[in-house]
Image (tube, helix red, strand yellow):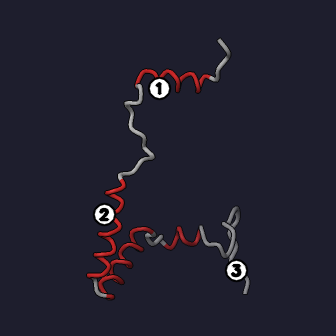
Amino acid sequence: MPKKDLNRLAKAIVDQATKGILPSSKTKNVAAVALGKLGGEARAAKLSEEQRLESAKKANAARWPKKPDAVRAETSPKRPPRRGVIRPAED
């Protein structure tokens, strides 16, 4: 028997034991995808511009929550984080 990589051997054992019982996580239900697209378009058509704007603002807040000022100052791209002795800024 030729030498095999242990990962390939483990996969072969699992494949043989399950004989294709395990579902593939990469497949999608085509009908569900089509219905999802139709639902989004229908909802957008029913909403007024003000309602769409409010929904977009809510989604934006959920995706990118505001950071506290202390965290914002530490991660500011304007200057590198301070290390060591903190000196007052010179004007």
Q: Nearer the viewer, mark 2 or mark 3?
A: 2
Graded by Cα atoms within 10 Å as few (under 14), some (14 to 19) or many (20 or more), the crowding at tag 2 reads: few
Q: Nearer the viewer, residue 87 or 16?
A: 16
The first of marks 2 and 3 along the sequence is 2
The residue that label 2 is drawn on is: 35
Q: Is mark 2 on a helix, strand or loop?
A: helix
Q: How many angstroms separate mark 1 from mark 3 (CA)?
A: 65 Å
Q: Do the residues labelled 2 and 3 touch (CB within 8 Å)?
A: no
Where residue 70 sits: x, y (%)?
52, 70
Amino acid of disc 3 = Ala
- Residue 32, quarter of picture: bottom left
Report if the CB atoms under discs 1 and 3 are less than 8 Å apart: no
Compared across the picture, whether 37 is left or right of 3 comes to: left
- Could you say which disc has been placed on residue 5 in the image? none
Q: Rounded to the nearest whole Å, what is the CA distance between mark 2 and mark 3?
A: 58 Å
Q: Which of marks 2 and 1 is nearer the N terminus?
A: 1
Q: How far apart are marks 2 and 1 (CA)?
A: 33 Å
Residue drawn 36% across the image and 59% down it: 33
Alpha-carbon neighbours of circle 1 within 10 Å: few (<14), some, or many (≥20)?
few
User: Disc 1 marks which residue?
Assistant: 15
Type of amino acid at the residue the image marks with label 1: Asp
Mark 3 sits on what residue? 89
